[in-house]
């Protein structure tokens, strides 16, 4: 363990003295900053920060980093991904270019079921190796905490295999990993005409074993036409509650039919996607604890509407931005690109987007106690950007990796 001093920081951004609730409304616009700043790190934690002229002379550091002309900000907290998978799906990408929709591809047995066939045949080691590479990739782009879902197994053995891989990733990789059980992602072909049977399998066989092995923190379900409905969700969420699993759900991606209200009533930590929203959905979320998890790169890649983030912020709905990194709808784990897309396509300010991708992302994973902001005592998971003079430059100069150095638990783990 060592002490690190980052000095001469052009802009230190994302400072929060204390954090007690997701940032929402007009407060989302302030990304508290100090110019010409320092951060002092003791072991793995942020020990102090402030203006260079107030840097105490007795701060002894083993490692000195100079961040002149650069921004230092908290690592991205990516609260929605599916990065454990066996195989890419670029043929579906080409099929969409040729005119098929995401739903049409799924009806032909592609989509999630395509990934399930491949994953069932992959070993735990293969899945681990593939996911570790993707974690390395997102680490290099400044992500320091990530949520990963199951949902490509869709049988007892394969869902448990995925979740075990997710737990191993947390142990083997410097990025903090949260685990979500998404058994109700799609109906597997062997239950094609027996949804009730599959839900019983989830409730009676998957959930108890997941609980025994402590394999998940959260539970998810894809509420959508052709997938699962509100009654299915209520059953699975009720059963999951008995095992202490907190709901984080996929809802309103293609159709709005009351799923948001139902999941807010289930005390969901987040409701994600929200590309299709009606007035009742806004009403259900306004002022509530449940966070709207928005995924602009999914909209970009599938060519579907962007979630109405501007209206959500203006209506006091807490939002988080995440990648949705998965082989079907969003084959990208680049949070910098997500922040850019949110500014460009959702018309939210750079400061709002950065807060939504850091501290509010941490909330959407119940990791706000240790991640997502420059706060004394929090983990020193920080990014040092390439040279840039303003916050707006970060999403403006899009398409490159703007991150130069990544610190995880106080150590430089990536330097470009
Ligand atoms: O969040 N919409 C449901 N699930 C994923 C996509 C899964 C897939 O296509 O493999 C999503 O977009
Ligand atoms: Fe997703």
Image (spheres, helix red, strand yellow):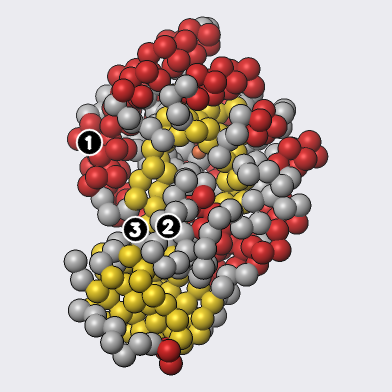
Residue with the mark numbered 3: 139
Q: Within the image, what quadrant is residue 104 found in? A: top right
Residue mark closest to the camera, 1 vs 3: 3
Identify whether 415 is placed above or below 363.
below
**Mark 3 CB lies closer than 8 A to ligand 2:** no
The residue that appears at 25% across and 67% down in the rendered structure is: 43
In percent of width and height, residue 108 lies at 51, 22
Q: Secondary structure at mark 3?
A: helix
Mark with earlier residue (1, 2): 1
Query: Which residue is the site of mark 1?
Result: 126
Which of 318/94 is in front? 318
| Residue 405 shown left or right of residue 24 in the figure | left
- Quadrant containing the C terminus is bottom left
Depth check: 269 or 108 in front?
269
235 over 329 or under it: above or below: above
| Mark 2 → mark 3, Cα distance in angstroms | 15 Å
Where residue 29 sits in the image (x, y, percent)? 65, 67
On residue 393, the disc is: none
Residue 186 shows up from this direction: no
Residue bearing mark 2: 371
Kindly check if marks 1 and 3 are in contact, taking CB atoms under 8 A apart as contact: no
Q: CA distance from mark 1 to mark 3?
A: 20 Å
Residue 240 spot, x, y in % from top left: 48, 23
Q: Is 158 positioned to the left or the right of 23 in the image?
A: left
Label 2 SS: loop
The residue furthest bottom is 53
Q: Nearer the viewer, mark 1 or mark 2?
A: 2
**Badge 2, how many Cα within 10 Å: few under 14, some, many 20+?**
many
Question: Which residue is at the far right?
Answer: 279
Secondary structure of the residue carrying numbered label 1:
helix
């Amino acid at each position: 363990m060592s002490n690190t001093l980052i000095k001469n920081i052009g802009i230190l951004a994302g400072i929060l003295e204390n954090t007690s609730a997701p940032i929402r409304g007009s407060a989302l616009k302030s990304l508290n900053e100090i110019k010409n700043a320092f951060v002092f790190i003791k072991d793995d934690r942020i020990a102090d920060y402030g203006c260079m002229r107030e840097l105490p002379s007795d701060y002894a550091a083993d490692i000195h980093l100079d961040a002149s002309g650069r921004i230092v900000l908290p690592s991205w907290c990516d609260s929605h991904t599916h990065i454990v998978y066996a195989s890419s799906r670029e043929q579906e990408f080409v099929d969409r270019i040729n005119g098929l929709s995401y739903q049409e591809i799924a009806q032909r047995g592609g989509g999630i079921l395509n990934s399930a066939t491949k994953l069932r045949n992959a070993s735990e080691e293969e899945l681990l190796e593939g996911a570790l590479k993707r974690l390395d990739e997102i680490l290099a782009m400044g992500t320091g905490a990530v949520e990963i879902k199951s949902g490509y197994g869709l049988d007892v053995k394969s869902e448990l295999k995925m979740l075990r891989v997710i737990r191993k990733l947390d142990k083997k990789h410097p990025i903090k990993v949260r685990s979500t059980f998404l058994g109700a992602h799609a109906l597997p072909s062997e239950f094609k005409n027996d949804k009730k049977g599959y839900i019983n399998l989830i409730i009676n066989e998957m959930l108890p074993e997941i609980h025994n092995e402590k394999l998940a923190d959260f539970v998810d379900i894809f509420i959508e036409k052709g997938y699962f409905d509100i009654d299915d969700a209520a059953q699975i969420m009720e059963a999951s509650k008995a095992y202490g699993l907190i709901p984080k759900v996929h809802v309103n991606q293609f159709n709005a039919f009351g799923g948001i209200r139902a999941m807010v009533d289930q005390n969901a930590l987040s409701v994600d996607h929200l590309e299709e929203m009606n007035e009742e959905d806004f009403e259900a979320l306004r002022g509530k604890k449940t966070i709207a998890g928005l995924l602009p790169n999914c909209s970009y890649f599938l060519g579907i509407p962007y979630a109405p983030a501007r209206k959500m912020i203006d209506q006091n709905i807490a939002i988080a931005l995440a990648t949705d990194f998965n082989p079907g709808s969003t084959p990208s784990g680049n949070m910098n690109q997500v922040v850019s897309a949110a500014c460009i396509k959702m018309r939210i300010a750079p400061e709002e987007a950065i807060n939504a991708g850091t501290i509010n992302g941490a909330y959407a994973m119940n990791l706000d106690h240790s991640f997502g902001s420059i706060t004394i005592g929090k983990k020193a998971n920080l990014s040092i950007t390439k040279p840039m003079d303003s916050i707006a430059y970060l999403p403006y100069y899009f398409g490159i990796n703007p991150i130069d150095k990544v610190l995880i638990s106080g150590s430089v783990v990536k330097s470009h």
